[in-house]
Image (cartoon, grey):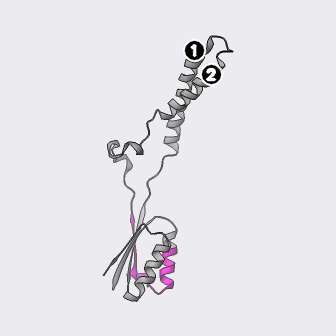
Amino acid sequence: MHEIMSLYPSSLTVELIITQLQKIGVQQRSISCYFFDPPNVSNRRNYDLTPFETSNKVDLGFIFATIFGVIFASLGFRLPLGPIIWGVTSSFIGFAIGYAMDNFFKIHYKEKPQSYVMIIIHCSQDQVRFVKKILTDYQALGITVID
């Protein structure tokens, strides 16, 4: 008897894999599924991430400040108070809008951690090749065979 372990994101493909395995003759009692809970994101430290994986909270604020500042400074030549006042004032307003939008999207559209499923199949030597083909067809994150 061989054991084949594979790892998948938690989705409906796990059900399809189990159905395909049963079609080739693997019994249901020979298939085990283990669900991994996603890690608790609130306990993660910011220093665990590389600088490329993080974004500063004020990035979008600076982008909007630049856009508003350039546009309204250009328009300030035709408006009362001149381009400097309009450019500086609109930069502050643009920063506030960008910062508020960034906070809104980070709160409401936060990426949720993904859970994973490990499938362990007990099968005979002649079934190993077919089982591995099914698992790779469904894009397993990892496969290992234990003799």
* Kind of residue at badge 2: Phe
Q: Could you say whether the residue bearing mark 1 is in a helix, strand or loop?
A: helix
Determine the image quadrant of residue 73: top right
Bounds of the magenta span? 16-38
Label 2 to label 1, Cα distance in Å? 9 Å
From the viewer's perspective, is 82 left or right of 31?
right
The relative height of residue 83 versus residue 126 in the rendered view (above or below) is above
Q: Is residue 117 visible?
A: yes
* Kind of residue at badge 1: Ile
User: Is 23 contained in the magenta span?
Assistant: yes
Q: Which residue is tagged 2? A: 72
Using a 10 Å C-alpha cutoff, classify the residue at mark 2 as few (fewer than 14 neighbours), some (14 to 19) or many (20 or more): many
Q: Which residue is tagged 1? A: 84
Give me the residue at 66% from left, 11% from top. Answer: 80
Residue 96 horizontal/vertical position (percent): 53, 27
Using a 10 Å C-alpha cutoff, classify the residue at mark 1 as few (fewer than 14 neighbours), some (14 to 19) or many (20 or more): some
User: Is 134 contained in the magenta span?
Assistant: no
Give me the residue at 60% from left, 17% from top. Answer: 86
